[in-house]
Image: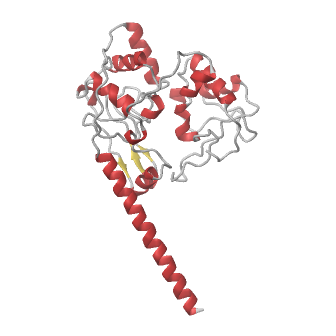
Amino acid sequence: MKRILKWAAIVVGVVLVAAAGFACLQVRAFNASMAKVYDVPLPVITRSTDPAVVARGKHIAESVAGCASSDCHGADLAGGKPMKFGPIGTVVGPNITPAGHGAAYSDGELARLILDGLKRDGRSLTFMPSTDINWLPDDDIQAVISYVRTVSPVKKPDGVGEIGFIGKVLDRRDILPIDVARRIDHGHRTTAPAPTTTAAYGAFVSRVCVGCHGEHLSGGPIPGAPSSLPIPANITKHPSGIKDWTFADFDRLLTQGVKRDGKKLNPFMPVETFGKFNDVEKQALWAYLESVPPAAFGGR
């Protein structure tokens, strides 16, 4: 028995050492990827002072793009509150007003940041949802930048964010997207069709849901997230999801943060953003959810 225990301990030790070595290689790969300088040309963007364009930009920033949520850049775009994900790390949206990073970036650099997830120096951003919003057509990109240029300057230092060891490993295993630029095809860009109440347009709008609810929108625990983080629900038409929901139920959820059973949503769900979707965006998203194959809860 002692010999068996001894060999078992040796095997366990070897496995642990191998796992640690593998994890270290993943961290090294993450750091190297984040240090990479991408050679992506700046888009040609001409900001507008047209009130209608600025208003459109404000709507996009506050709704589909989610820039003005408290978990991103904040309502005044001067920086959001830190989002703490335990061992994964801490994420915080920076100040992008004219008193912050907005002053340092040209219009073309802002456009590239949105579309390609790249900072001024050509290196990747972390957690910037470029893959969720780089389908926006050029006129919407122009509108967002035009709006950002109109906000009041706010002197506020950026919060401190960092990616932990576990977060880096999860990123390299493609379980949790943190390194933004490496996930984007910088030579090819797909844009959405004109905004209509169709599933085709809703498929693009739904990209803002994937990060939490998963690729198949069936919810389940977010890999690597601390137990304190809410578990995203299944939003497919499965019995464990929203099979019996109506559009009215869905609209109430988005605009009021109230579920079908009358209970309030966890504040982790960004109702402040989704509640500002216009009727076309809500109807299109609903049409898309009705078209998604039902999937059992937890399949993500």
The spot of residue 232 in percent (x, y) is: 60, 42
Q: Quadrant of residue 267?
A: top right
Numbered circles on residues, count:
0
Judge whether 35 appears above or below 52 on screen.
Answer: below
Closest to the observer, 172 or 206: 172
Q: Quadrant of the N terminus?
A: bottom right
The answer to whether residue 26 is above or below residue 218 is below
Answer left or right for 108 relative to 140: left
Q: Is residue 229 above or below residue 49?
A: below
**Residue occupying image coordinates x 52% and y 87%:** 6
Q: How is the image coloured?
A: secondary structure
Which is more toward the observer, 247 or 142?
Answer: 142
Residue most extreme to the bottom: 2
Give the x, y percent position of residue 109: 28, 27
Image coords of residue 4 (percent x, y) = 57, 88
Task: Name the residue at the left extreme.
Answer: 104
- Please give the name of the residue rendered at 44% of the width and 14% of the height, measured from the top-left corner: 56
- From the viewer's perspective, is 195 left or right of 46? right
Residue pictured at 55% horizontal, 91% vertical: 3
Do we see residue 110 in this rendering? Answer: yes
The quarter of the image holding the C terminus is: top right
Q: Does the image show residue 154?
A: no
Frontmost residue, 200 versus 244: 200
Name which quarter of the figure residue 25 lies in: bottom left
Snapshot quadrant of residue 53: top left
- The image shows residue 130 at horizontal and vertical percentages of 42, 33
